[in-house]
Amino acid sequence: MRIQFSLQALLLLALMLVDQSPCDSIWAQELAGQRGADSFSGYAGNSELEACIPPKFKFVYRIGDFYILGTDERPRESDRDDRQGKEVVLQAVRLFGSFLDSNEDGKVDDPRLLKSLGDNFAFAIGSDRKLRPVEELIERRTGRYVISMKTDIWTFFPNWSGRGFRFNGFEDSMWRPKPMNALWEECFHTITEAYCRCNKEWGFGKKSRLGLLMAEDIAAGNYDIERQNKMEGGEYDWETAVNEYVHQIWLANQARKSAPLTKSQKQVLEFMQSTPGFPMKVNPKYPLDISIRVR
């Protein structure tokens, strides 16, 4: 009887090992996915930066060593009154995932870009009042500049596709399609700023290739930055203007409306297209998860 019982027990154990429960399979897949994310990133995270993030920032993610953090504050202007801060953070994670992995193969298209993001920047989401102290603290302690999506000031339209708007060209730095999801713009600016620090061809200064092309457009009477500069009390600097100029051109191309662009603007478009790994499109519903949740 003892031998028979032992054989039955062994057979039962073998069947259990072969036929794992669905919960066991899901757990294994999630564990493998987390390990995959760690392997993908190739980075261990930044404990110094994480120590700067106060508890009110309830959502913290990282892609490599590039951190995306946000509060649970509702966006002030959105398509619905019940939109939550978490939704803004999650879409930012997807946007950055898409910018880094345009062909959606689960690999970063330009590893230098990811490293530049992690070495130089962080991205924060929330109200201006809550963001300012954290922006200053992170920059002071880690040297990383924080680019922000201020949800009490700028619009969050999560279903915006970046297409479907009328476009006959733009004449100044204040042009934006309406309505527009401002989160796209802030994420894009973060990407281009990171390129300026990892690609010697990129720059926003007056003698840079992009700066010279914008200057050509201004000299030809096709573009203006002075209107915005006056509105901002003379604080709208050249480098910021060039970054916005690039964004406007990228946005027109993303919408498949590049035909009305000026000669100089089309040269900027060609410049972006010639940069290896540069994201010429973005998918706000990026389906892969290349991020790691920290909090």
Image: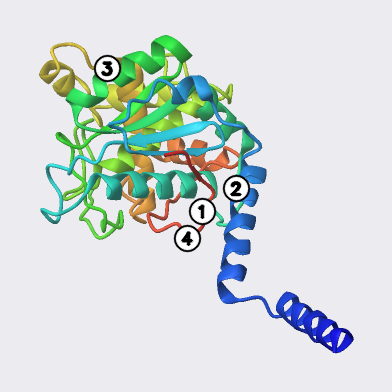
The residue that mark 2 highlights is 37
Task: Tell me which residue sits at (32%, 14%) in the image.
Answer: 136
Q: Quick one: label 2 or label 3, which is nearer the N terminus? A: 2
- Quarter that holds the C terminus: top left
Please state which of residues 37 and 244 is positioned toward the viewer in this rendering.
Answer: 37
Vertical position of residue 92 compared to residue 236: above or below: below
Mark 4 or mark 2, which is nearer to you?
Answer: 2
Mark 1 or mark 4, which is nearer to you?
Answer: 1
Image side of residue 162 versus residue 100, left or right: left
Task: Tell me which residue sits at (85%, 84%) in the image.
Answer: 2
Q: CA distance from mark 4 to mark 3?
A: 33 Å
Please state which of residues 278 and 2 is positioned toward the viewer in this rendering.
Answer: 2
Res. 109 image quadrant: top right
Q: CA distance from mark 4 to mark 2?
A: 14 Å
Question: The disc labelled 4 sits on which kind of residue?
Answer: Pro
Q: Quick one: label 1 or label 3, which is nearer the N terminus? A: 3
Looking at this view, name the residue that lies furthest to the right: 3
Q: CA distance from mark 2 to mark 3?
A: 31 Å
The residue that mark 4 highlights is 287
Question: The disc labelled 2 sits on which kind of residue?
Answer: Ala
The residue that mark 1 highlights is 289
Give residue 217's position: percent from left, percent from top. Answer: 32, 28
Image side of residue 104 versus residue 174, left or right: right
| Residue 133 marker | 3
